[in-house]
Amino acid sequence: MTDVHEYVTIPCPTTNAKDLLQQFLTELPDEFFCVTEKEADSQLKSHMISLLGSEELFEELQKDCDLDNLYVEDEFHTLDELLHVLPDRASRHLEPLKTLEAIPKDLSEKDIEKNSLGIRSRFRRPLVDMGYLNSPDGLFDCGLPIQDVVLTVFVYRPIALSVVDCSNAPWTMVMEQRIEILGSQMLSTLRDAIKCPQDMIYLGDCSEAIDNPDVHIPARAMYPSSYFFIEGVFYDDLRDPRATRLSTPVIEWQENRKERVTETYSASTMADHVLGDLTVTLGKPYLFLHQGNCEHIIIFTTMRLTDRTCAQSVSAYPKCTGKAPQKRMSCEACNSLRAQWLVHDAGDLLPKDPTMLCITCLRYLLYTPDGEKIHPRFRVQKFFGYEFCR
């Protein structure tokens, strides 16, 4: 029986950053807009005293609600302390804990099964570090803390659909960047914050002038066109005079389809829209396309109002608050230095096509001491990261 995978669209509520700001800004307490923790505590204290009518009653309530009252004497506070006093279950005729059975025993470290740090080190670390906290940078636009909405955007690496099973796509997608941006900033600002090696690839063959950076032209300098596709609207980047609307062929194809379709597409420009104007669905995948066919999934994951833990200057945004770990690609000749160049069409000189080489092996294997190519047909391209994903 052939496996059939069905994709179902579940209707979800949409969210607008400007509406969120207008709805909740007037409902927030005064201490929310304080910059320092001391100032916020002072505001909260004065507000509570006015409600209770007595400062003594507030201090008594504060003492009774202290978090230290939740602990009893000789109680363990950390996971390490709990694991070190774990009772022996075998002597009590109890089944062993499956979690501890799965932990490998290391003779060189007898207590590794009881060390929480050792346990956590064996789990695969997340692709993007979520354990961060923004801090105020001390700069204030107009002398006041900013009142805006912070949107968190996940940007994923492109995947080669020809070799990937789409039904298993969540396991093959790699989150490349975690970006925080203000709702008052332009959509084009988000585009500039997305970093992809395909924009940095040098066009053409670099084998004749490896050491001459003037002849190395990055792809984005020649092909600046790109677009976001969000809720049926293409937002093209037309800031560069050489840019073209990449969305035009897609819209024409949609309009000329023989099948009857109910949805229609429209086109606009990035520079004419701020993120706060967009109506998006949190968690829904949208599309960012550049360099003709390099497609990234982007997902708006959260919206929150700015507070005192956020950077208090608009110039501090957008900021990358997480990145995927980059795998170090070693040179396939020396297997020691980092690969920097891709060599194509080298024939029998190299074992595979293309071959990743460091600059040292490239010079010694394919060039004479005078800098001349020993093979006239091979081509060299700069290697930046995950170019093989396409």
Image (cartoon, rainbow, N blue to C red):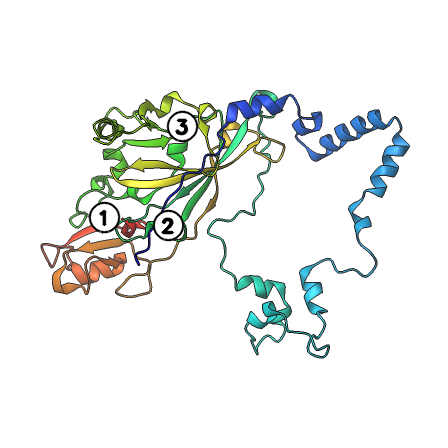
- Residue 199, can we see it? no
Q: Quadrant of the N terminus?
A: bottom left
User: Measured from the top left, where is residue 77 in percent x and y?
Assistant: 73, 57
Say what amino acid the circle numbered 1 marks.
Asp
Of 42 and 83, the residue lying toward us: 83
What secondary structure is found at the residue carrying circle 2? helix
User: Measured from the top left, where is residue 80 in percent x and y?
Assistant: 67, 63
Tell us which disc is closer to us: 2 or 1.
Answer: 2
Q: Which residue is identified by label 3?
A: 187
Q: Are marks 2 and 1 in contact (CB under 8 Å)?
A: no
In the image, what residue occupies the spot 15% across and 64% down?
349
What secondary structure is found at the residue carrying circle 1? loop
- Residue 55, can we see it? yes
The residue lying furthest to the left in this view is 376
Examine the rendered structure and indicate whether residue 313 appears above or below residue 295: above
In the image, what residue occupies the spot 31% across and 24% down?
267
Examine the rendered structure and indicate whether residue 218 appears above or below residue 365: above
Sequence-earlier tag: 2 or 3: 2
Q: Using a 10 Å C-alpha cutoff, classify the residue at mark 1 as few (fewer than 14 neighbours), some (14 to 19) or many (20 or more).
A: few
Sequence-earlier tag: 2 or 1: 2
Of 221 and 31, the residue lying toward us: 31
> How far apart are the alpha carbons under marks 2 and 3?
27 Å
> How far apart are the alpha carbons under marks 3 and 1?
37 Å
Q: Using a 10 Å C-alpha cutoff, classify the residue at mark 3 as few (fewer than 14 neighbours), some (14 to 19) or many (20 or more).
A: many
Q: Which residue is identified by label 1?
A: 211
Q: Which residue is identified by label 2?
A: 169
User: Measured from the top left, where is residue 96 in percent x and y?
Assistant: 64, 73
Examine the rendered structure and indicate whether residue 361 appears above or below residue 315: below
